[in-house]
Image: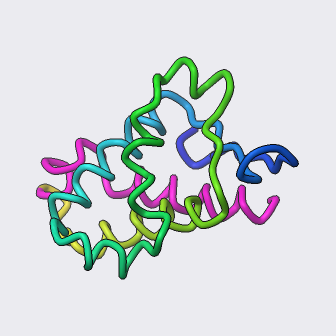
Amino acid sequence: MRARVRIRRTDEGPGWVLIPGTDQLALLRRCTDAFHAEMPDRGQRDFVLGEHGESLPALFAADPAAAADAGLPMTEGALRAAHTLLVTLLALIPSERVFMERTGHYRDHVKAVAYGLRRAASGQ
């Protein structure tokens, strides 16, 4: 299910590991690309996503099989930036048709992953 996002805390590395399903990683990758296209100015992106936002394209470019096995090491700030990116993209593109054209995903799926990130980070 798209809404079930798996995250675990770790004592190693940046503190969190996101274990995305193949479809979730594709969604995160496409939404990151669409966000950058909608907001090409880096200053604006930094304002919205904070200092961790620029790391997202490289994180989400990971090999899906490797990401499913080992997960994506992320800081809490990067997790927040990912959530903020999804929620902001939903606000930036209000039309369902245009949203689908630019992201390749339905708005409801993006909402579900954003919700799943929040729930997983809070331990629910």
Q: Is residue 2 magenta?
A: no
Vertical order, 50 against 110 (above or below)? below
Vertical order, 111 against 67 (above or below)? below
Where does residue 16 sit, x and y in percent of width and height? 73, 50
Point out the stretch of residues depicted in magenta.
98-124
Where does residue 52 sit, x and y in percent of width and height? 49, 64
Q: In the figure, is residue 101 to the left or right of 36?
A: left
Q: Is residue 118 magenta?
A: yes
Where does residue 83 sit, x and y in percent of width and height? 50, 64
Q: Residue at x 46, y 30 (%)?
A: 62
- According to the image, what is the colour scheme of the structure? rainbow
Which quarter of the rendering shows the N terminus? top right
Q: Residue at x 29, y 44 (%)?
A: 30
Q: In the figure, is residue 61 to the left or right of 77?
A: left
Q: Quadrant of residue 75?
A: bottom right
Vertical order, 100 against 70 (above or below)? below
Q: Residue at x 43, y 40 (%)?
A: 60
